[in-house]
């Protein structure tokens, strides 16, 4: 059975893992720990725990427990002092308090939820993102970065406010992986928040496993407006090394006109990520185009404090997972075909 290491966070990882778990894979889901907004941010500030939100989504995605248990983990309270909090976030915070640390608490959660594979926080320590802009100013914290518009000013560097100790299991998972998959997800808060940890970037560079990047469907106003596929690849390879991405999974289907209009009202024109074939004739990655779009509009959970900021155009988990499986087998099939004379 092939081992796949996924890197990301938030709804992007939830979507991808929901599809991958249906295939014969040993999954190691490496998850960002920089979230400080919404329910996770409140728990982090009030209880001194690590942010559980992204980990919760990955646990639910890979859980083979009953539907009732998965529904319970995602349930959000809508009134009282717990309004906006999900049961799953509270559950994981309680496990951190009753165990030696957050990482041990997650191990117990995986047993309770009968998780296929392993959910791996990229760090077991506090991780406070800091975005340095070209004019010398800083944006502190993932939540502030997520809601800021800094594209015109320009980004100098994304880093952590203080050194972050990598989870050694994350590094080992990358070293042992037969396939590495990055994204989809917010460029700064979910994807780069993992990759800027030096040990993670180094492990990816040193691995011989094919690296698949699942590029986002849409750009983000004030941050990645007008970005095409190459812009995203450049941003990631600036951290992990030029030429390291082998395949890019790119959705070439347009959403329904109703969704396009709704999204344009929120994000402006040109929000869909484009492929510019003539832009770079010396690409080192191979583009895999297809219909990876989820049909219909995504509905958000009642009580979700961040619902207004979440995308309602998303990948289809099964379509993307099947494409990843096909691409992972491609080198073997090509070796067979190339041997034919």
Image: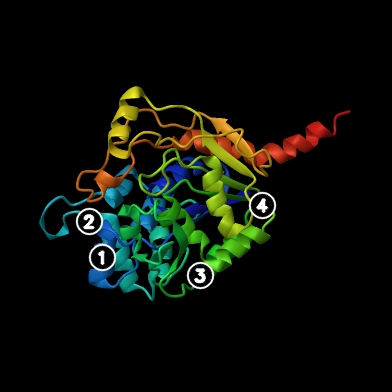
Q: Quadrant of the image for the C terminus?
A: top right
**Disc 3 + disc 1, Cβ < 8 Å:** no
Q: Which residue is mark 3?
A: 166
Mark 3 Cα within 10 Å, few/some/many (few <14, many 20+)?
A: some
Pointer 4 and pointer 1: residues touching (CB < 8 Å)?
no
Horizontal side of 158 relative to 288 (left or right) equals left
Q: Is residue 45 visible to the viewer in this orientation of the structure?
A: yes
From what the image shows, is residue 299 above or below residue 237?
A: above
Rendered location of residue 111, percent (x, y):
42, 59
What residue sits right under mark 2 in the picture? Answer: 85
User: Do the CB atoms of the residues marked 4 and 3 lie less than 8 Å apart?
Assistant: no
> Which residue is pictured at 32% across the width and 31% down the height?
297
| Residue at the left extreme of this rendering | 80
Vertical side of 168 occupied by 52: above or below: above
Q: CA distance from mark 4 to mark 1?
A: 37 Å
| Res 43 label | 1
Q: Is disc 2 surrounded by few (<14), some (14 to 19) or many (20+) residues within 10 Å?
A: many
| Element under disc 1 | helix
Q: Label 4 neighbourhood size at 10 Å, few (<14), some (14-19), many (20+)? A: many
147 sits to left or right of 212: left
Residue 209, numbered label: 4
Disc 2 + disc 1, Cβ < 8 Å: yes
Spatial CA distance of label 4 from label 3 is 21 Å
The spot of residue 127 in percent (x, y) is: 40, 68
Dot placed on the residue nearer the N-terminal end, 2 or 4: 2
Which comes sooner in the sequence, label 4 or label 1?
1
42 over 340 or under it: above or below: below
């Amino acid at each position: 059975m092939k081992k796949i290491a996924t890197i990301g966070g938030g709804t992007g990882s939830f979507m991808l893992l929901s599809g991958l778990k249906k295939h014969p894979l040993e999954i190691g889901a490496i998850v960002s720990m920089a979230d400080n907004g919404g329910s996770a941010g409140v728990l982090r500030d009030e209880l001194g725990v690590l942010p559980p939100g992204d980990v919760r989504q990955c646990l639910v995605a890979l859980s083979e427990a009953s539907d009732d248990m998965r529904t319970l983990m995602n349930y959000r309270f809508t009134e009282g002092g717990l309004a906006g909090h999900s049961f799953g976030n509270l559950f994981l915070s309680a496990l951190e308090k009753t165990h030696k640390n957050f990482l041990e608490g997650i191990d117990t959660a995986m047993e309770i939820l009968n998780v296929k594979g392993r959910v791996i926080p990229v760090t077991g320590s506090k991780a406070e993102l800091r975005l340095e802009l070209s004019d010398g100013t800083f944006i502190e914290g993932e939540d502030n970065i997520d809601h800021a518009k800094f594209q015109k000013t320009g980004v100098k560097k994304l880093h952590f406010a203080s050194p972050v100790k990598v989870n050694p299991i994350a590094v080992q998972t990358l070293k042992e992986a037969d396939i590495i998959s990055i994204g989809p997800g917010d460029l700064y808060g979910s994807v780069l928040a993992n990759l800027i940890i030096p040990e993670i970037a180094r492990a990816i560079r040193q691995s011989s496993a094919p690296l698949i990047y699942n590029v986002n469907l849409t750009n983000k106003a004030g941050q990645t407006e007008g970005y095409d596929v190459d812009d995203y690849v450049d941003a990631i390879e600036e951290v992990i090394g030029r030429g390291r991405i082998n395949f890019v999974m790119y959705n070439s289907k347009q959403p329904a006109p109703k969704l396009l209009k709704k999204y344009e009202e929120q994000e402006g024109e040109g929000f869909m990520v484009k492929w510019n074939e003539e832009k770079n004739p010396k690409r080192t990655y191979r583009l895999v185009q297809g219909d990876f779009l989820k049909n219909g509009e995504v509905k958000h959970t009642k009580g979700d404090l961040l619902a207004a900021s979440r995308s309602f155009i998303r990948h289809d988990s099964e379509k993307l997972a099947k494409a990843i499986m096909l691409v992972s087998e491609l080198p073997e099939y090509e070796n067979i075909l190339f041997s034919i004379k």
